[in-house]
Image: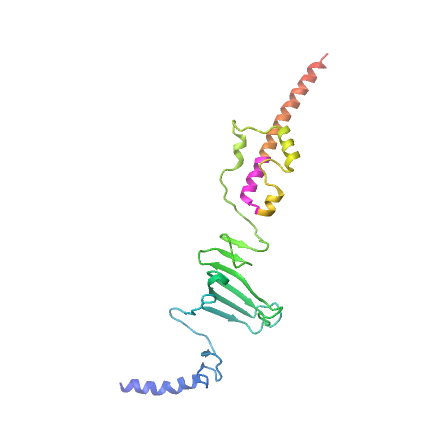
Amino acid sequence: MKYSLILMGLLFPMFMSAQITDQNGNIGIGITDPIQKLDVNGNILSRQGLISSVTNIDIGGYVSLQNPAKDQPGQAKVWNIYNMGGQGYGNSLQFWAYDNAGCTAGGMCTVRLTITDDGRVGIGTSRPQSALAVVGTITSQRMKVTQTGWADYVFDPGYKLPSLAAVQQHINTYRHLPDVPSAATIEQEGLDLGDMQRKQMQKIEELTLYILQQQKEIEELKAAVKKLTKP
């Protein structure tokens, strides 16, 4: 007990020099003019977790990461991560960026990344309607689309190859190839890469069959001409 009291006596002045409470009830550690309930000049180490709990259906708890050196327009001086909900923002985790002007006219005040409670991810949109929704251009060195029902069925013996006359009639009537969506459909519903690759391969394989048919006819005509011109 005596040693505990001696240790407390040694540590108490150090603790008091590091902890200051101002008139508003703010506590500062390593700082003399705290501006938050707890203001620490240094790193904080948590051996388990850090909980931000706010009972607000729209905003919820949040974490704010700030860099005062980023003070130019369009530079994200503040990144906030919110656990959002309600009709305004939807049930999601959202990453918001703010510059010096904040949410005033002309300021940066926008959501950059959204992860919905059911696992959908939105980049440039806070309301992703699919597993990954991106508003903008995607740059990738490689993209792999898993696709079933590939177009090799065109080469099956029972496949009915449309006649060129039927293809011509379809083009004259609808202004696009058979089995291929029209420009209006693409503009309204978007382009399914996997499905479109399958349809394009179907047309390539059909073209191959047309070429083989024509080559066979050419060889037959050549043989007939040769026979007719034989002395």
Magenta segment boundaries in residue numbering: 189-203
Asked if residue 74 lies left or right of residue 94, the reply is: right
Image point 61% across, 47% down: which residue?
187
Q: What colouring style does the render use?
A: rainbow
Tell me where residue 173 appears, x and y as whole percent: 65, 35
Question: 225 or 38: nearer the eye?
Answer: 38
Asked if residue 220 lies left or right of residue 51, the reply is: right
Asked if residue 118 lies left or right of residue 68, the reply is: left
Q: Quadrant of the N terminus?
A: bottom left
Question: 174 or 117: nearer the eye?
Answer: 174
Tell me where residue 178 appears, x and y as whole percent: 60, 35
Tell me where residue 93 appears, x and y as whole percent: 47, 62
The answer to whether residue 190 of the structure is visible from this angle is no
Magenta-colored segment: predominant secondary structure: helix
Image point 62% across, 23% down: which residue?
216
The stretch drawn in magenta includes residue 150: no
The answer to whether residue 2 of the structure is visible from this angle is yes
Q: Quadrant of the C terminus?
A: top right
Question: 58 or 168: nearer the eye?
Answer: 58
The stretch drawn in magenta includes residue 190: yes
Question: 219 or 157: nearer the eye?
Answer: 157
Q: Is residue 129 above or below residue 162?
A: below
Tell me where residue 158 appears, x and y as whole percent: 51, 27
Q: Where is residue 57, by image quadrant? A: bottom left
